[in-house]
Image (cartoon, grey):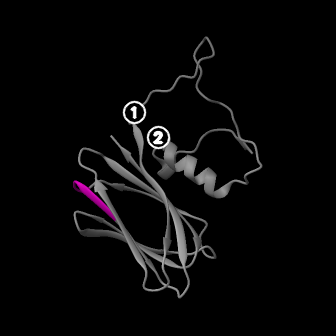
Amino acid sequence: MNVANWPSIEDTNVTNWPSIYNSSILNWPLDSNVTATNLPLDEQGNLRVRLIHSYYEWKSDSIVLDPYPGSWTGSNFTGGYRDATICISVGQGSINFTTKFLGTKVDSFELNPSTSVGFIKTYQVQGSNITLTAKNLVGINAWFTYSIYVTT
């Protein structure tokens, strides 16, 4: 795969590296090569990139849910961070996810392998704690993998 210019997620002209990385993991074939061209170089051929914000992988794990009504909740401190990006891939089952900041629901969505390869969304941090809850909607074990990145 040849990538002429890295895209700006949400048309902000700022490259969101965690989103690009996770999008490539979710959507590009494992056996394909990626060649990036038209990257900004200085006179000596060094990559010219200015880091505007730092991204940290805050948490990453694979979770198995018991059959309906199996559920899981993960929570952690987000104080001092600007954004939180959630990347989820469901391997089996149909799962309802809820995202909350300080107990206030900000998003709810359902994912399953037949309707969605994965989910990537960036939220503006709205307090000192983020919670992600997953509820199995089917009568078999369900599993998913998630990563959460935070931005300073």
- Answer left or right for 79 relative to 118: left
Type of the residue with mark 2: Val
SS at badge 1: loop
Q: Quadrant of the C terminus?
A: top left
Q: How many other residues sit within 10 Å of disc 1, few (<14), some (14-19) or many (≥20)?
A: few
The residue depicted at 60 percent of the width and 41 percent of the height is 6
Query: Which residue is under mark 2?
Result: 14
Query: Which residue is under mark 1?
Result: 52
Q: How many other residues sit within 10 Å of disc 2, few (<14), some (14-19) or many (≥20)?
A: few
Provide the residue span drawn in magenta.
126-131
Residue toward you, 119 or 133: 133
Q: Position of residue 36 (x, y in %)?
A: 67, 35
Type of the residue with mark 1: Ile
Residue toward you, 149 or 125: 149
The residue depicted at 36 percent of the width and 57 percent of the height is 123
Q: Quadrant of the N terminus?
A: top right
Q: Position of residue 93 (x, y in %)?
A: 56, 78
**Residue furthest top in the image:** 44
Q: Position of residue 148 (x, y in %)?
A: 42, 53
- CB of mark 2 within 8 Å of CB of mark 1? yes
Tag nearer the camera, 2 or 1: 1
Cα separation between marks 2 and 1: 9 Å
Mark 2 and mark 1 lie on one chain; the one further toward the N terminus is 2
**Residue furthest bottom in the image:** 139
- Answer left or right for 49 relative to 105: right
SS at badge 2: loop
The residue depicted at 28 percent of the width and 51 percent of the height is 78
